Amino acid sequence: MVSLNALKGFVGKENVLSTLEDRICYAYDGTKQKYIPDVVVRPRSTQHVSDVLRFANEHEIPVYPRGAGSGLTGGAVPVQGGIVLDFTHMNKILEIVPEDLTATVEPGVVTQILQNEAAKYKLFYPPDPASAAFSTIGGNVAECSGGITGLKYGVTRDYILSLEVVLADGSVIHTGRKTLKSVTGYDLTRLFVGSEGTLGVFTQITVKLLPLPEKIETLLVFFATPQDAVRTASLIISNNLLPRALEFIDKSSIDCIKGYKQEVQIPDEVNALLLIDVDGKETSVKAEISLIEKIAMENQPLRVVSAKTAQERDTLWEVRRVISPALYNIAPFKINEDICVPRSRILEALNRIAESHKRYPSLKVANFGHIGDGNIHVNIMYDEGDKQRMQAENMIEEILRTTVELGGTISGEHGIGNVKSAFLSLEIPPQELRIMKDIKHLLDPKGILNPGKMFV
Ligand SMILES: Cc1cc2nc3c(=O)[nH]c(=O)nc-3n(C[C@H](O)[C@H](O)[C@H](O)COP(=O)(O)OP(=O)(O)OC[C@H]3O[C@@H](n4cnc5c(N)ncnc54)[C@H](O)[C@@H]3O)c2cc1C
């Protein structure tokens, strides 16, 4: 039993939530699992976090760090009860230093708020998950989130310079430096990025910023076949062009968005789309976009639509934004996978997914995503009922096995959590898995940090 009095003594009674109504709000994340924690603590400082962890470690109470709870692999779900540490109140941007191109923030800062604040200094925080409007930097660092800008700018990992981390025993460490370069000792910062709340709890994060691009232009290209779209994407990259975004949308996703609230009309003969953003100085954007348009025109497009103003771009991007909600029009349940394969194997991956689908014809499957990174969101839609759920899970396992066979990874950006922990050994060999478990044991010997995640 968790001692509420001890916790209230550490963080103040107003920061401890113990009613069932309050605790239920912290039972979920983006996976729709439900595990109610014993108590929710809302730390306001590193000292609060340190006191709570020292206490939890002493009494072997599970602790589940939580940002916005938007994770798609169950990372923040308290599967063994215990304490949820809600970081949404540690949400200050502590400093933005234009001269150093850095920002230091508390973990509960919402990603888009950091992006907007940086933009006021004409600076750019590039990692851009589709959840940027509500997910937190702490959650992004813990998952090493990606997004639509990954092809040109990389993922969260590439922007984290240093971390303040509270370890399981309550001690506070600092990793990295607020410098663009540092090769002193092992790179502990990289070890913590993507550790999914299992190795330590972040209380301060210093990120790298870039100059804000002057101009962004967008192209939406309609194709009769997915082969034409994939070939065009490959040619863009092999011609040394690096778009800010290069997104693929398949026929099933297109069918879903037709009739959904968005302005772009997509004729029936369109079977694949590419959505392409180019950014940079005005002159270079102009040159790059016309080269990309030329490549697209040489690959049998049915139509090429371009957008130059923010409003026109928004209209084109709406096509991509509405896919996720529109998918629920075809079935009430969805499993959203985020496999990533070498770019040269994307067509093979799509063909193998289609073959697998033939074995489960009652399921609906829609593929879209960051083709420029080789990262495809495979969405399997199913109705309520054990039979369909089981078929969906079997199909997922086939797809994950195929992905590894093709040299890819079972998670490009959503992480492992408890949803994919059974599949970790498909990709990670025993010796590497042993090293990972040894690291976990070294940093959290009693296993209080996010137990039930990553490893089965
Ligand atoms: C509509 C939608 C779109 C999405 N789009 C994308 C996308 O484009 N790209 C992408 O990568 N993901 C995407 N996601 C998934 C999700 O938003 C990301 O994984 C995000 O980084 C989670 O942030 P969060 O604040 O919600 O974290 P949570 O879900 O609360 O937690 C995620 C993990 O972080 C840990 N954690 C949280 N805070 C801390 C901390 N301070 N210290 C240590 N560990 C901590 C938790 O324990 C948990 O393991 C999407 C989700 C939704 C619902």
Image (tube, rainbow, N blue to C red):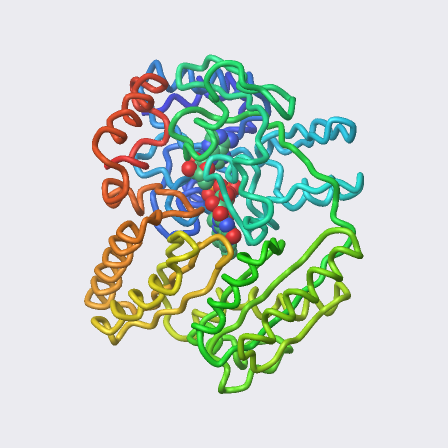
On-image quarter of the N terminus: top left
Tell which of 311 and 100 is nearer to you.
100
In the rendered image, the vertical position of residue 228 relative to residue 99, given as above or below:
below
Q: Give the percent coordinates (x, y) of residue 134.
A: 58, 48
Instruction: State the image quarter where residue 181 is shown.
Output: top right
Q: How many numbered marks appear?
A: 0
In the rendered image, the vertical position of residue 139 relative to residue 206, given as above or below:
below
At x 53% / y 42%, what residue is drawn? 155
At x 69% / y 60%, what residue is drawn? 288
At x 25% / y 67%, what residue is drawn? 356
On-image quarter of the C terminus: top left
Instruction: State the image quarter where residue 14 is shown.
Output: top right
Q: Give the percent coordinates (x, y) of residue 167.
A: 44, 18
Tell which of 452 and 268 is nearer to you.
268
* Residue 331 in view of the camera: yes
At x 48% / y 60%, what residue is drawn? 369
Q: Is residue 396 left or right of residue 23?
A: left
Q: Give the percent coordinates (x, y) of residue 91.
A: 63, 34
Instruction: State the image quarter where residue 417 is shown.
Output: top left
In the rendered image, the vertical position of residue 396 relative to residue 62, given as above or below:
below
Tell which of 52 and 314 is nearer to you.
314
In the rendered image, the vertical position of residue 366 relative to residue 302, given as above or below:
above
Q: Is residue 99 left or right of residue 415?
A: right
Q: Is residue 256 left or right of residue 176?
A: left
* Residue 69 in view of the camera: no
Q: Give the percent coordinates (x, y) of residue 177.
A: 60, 19
